[in-house]
Image (cartoon, grey):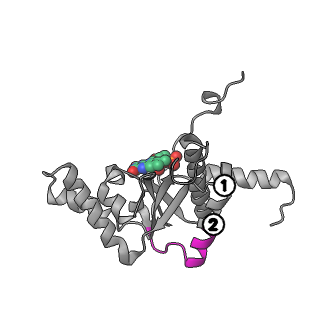
Amino acid sequence: MEFASGKELMEYTNALIHSRQNVSPRRLAEPGPSDQQCQDILGTAAAAPDHGQLVPWRFVIVPKHRRELLAEVFGLALLDRDPNATPEQVESAREKAYRAPFLMLAIARLAGTDTQTEIGNSERLVSFGCAIQNILLSAHGAGFGTGLTSGQAMASPRLRALFSLNRHEQAVCCINIGTVTKRKPARLRPDMASFVTSL
Ligand SMILES: Cc1cc2nc3c(=O)[nH]c(=O)nc-3n(C[C@H](O)[C@H](O)[C@H](O)COP(=O)(O)O)c2cc1C
């Protein structure tokens, strides 16, 4: 892709980054990304900084015809935590599996997953987060809304079994993508001075 200048590329990139905002899956409707768009969007994860090329992430797409399996896990995980949960609460937990047109689980591959290396979990989690951010920005650039959802079900043995997680893997969140039906006002971002100092 040709840009007239580095300045143009920077302005474009900054505009993309600053205009992204979380969109709740409740406000994500069809259409979701096409197969080709999914390829393009998910492929950007590979451009994340990755010390040692460990690929410390794994994503599992949950297609529409498999959402019932995730709904079942969400509902039963709630009952495991709270046997007194009401049918309405269980239904609300289950319903989260169906909201976004595109949904996939983001899994961090922590130390121990691969052969012995000194690259620890802090670095792996930075790479993992960058891979997710690449996906969010790419989807946003393609015109879609994106939202991250987590919750206690991420730690459920039922979820771990459904996604065949090994003991070094951790389910962190779901990445939801779709067409935005309603956008909230952008949240106020922290001032740079609040997180940057000079030594
Ligand atoms: C790993 C991760 C999981 C998240 N899970 C949830 C969630 O379950 N529910 C929620 O309302 N926000 C969740 N969030 C926060 C939103 O994704 C979002 O980042 C936050 O509301 C700030 O909005 P912004 O991204 O527009 O700045 C999560 C964020 C991260 C990084």
Q: Nearer the viewer, residue 115 or 46?
A: 115
The residue carrying mark 2 is 43
Q: Nearer the viewer, residue 62 or 176?
A: 62
Regarding mark 2 in the picture, which secondary structure is present there?
A: helix
Q: Nearer the viewer, residue 80 or 7?
A: 80
Q: Quadrant of the C terminus?
A: top right
Amino acid type, callout 1: Gln
State which mark lies toward you, 1 or 2. 1
Q: Quadrant of the N terminus?
A: bottom right
The answer to if 109 sits in the magenta stretch is no
Q: Is residue 49 visible?
A: no
Label 1 Cα neighbours within 10 Å, binned few <14 / some 14-19 / many ≥20: few
Residue 53 image label: 1
Q: Which label's residue is closer to the chain start, 1 or 2? A: 2
Q: Could you say where residue 108 lies in the image, as x and y percent from the top left?
A: 50, 53
Amino acid type, callout 2: Gly
Label 2 Cα neighbours within 10 Å, binned few <14 / some 14-19 / many ≥20: some
Residue range (magenta): 29-41
Residue 170 image label: none
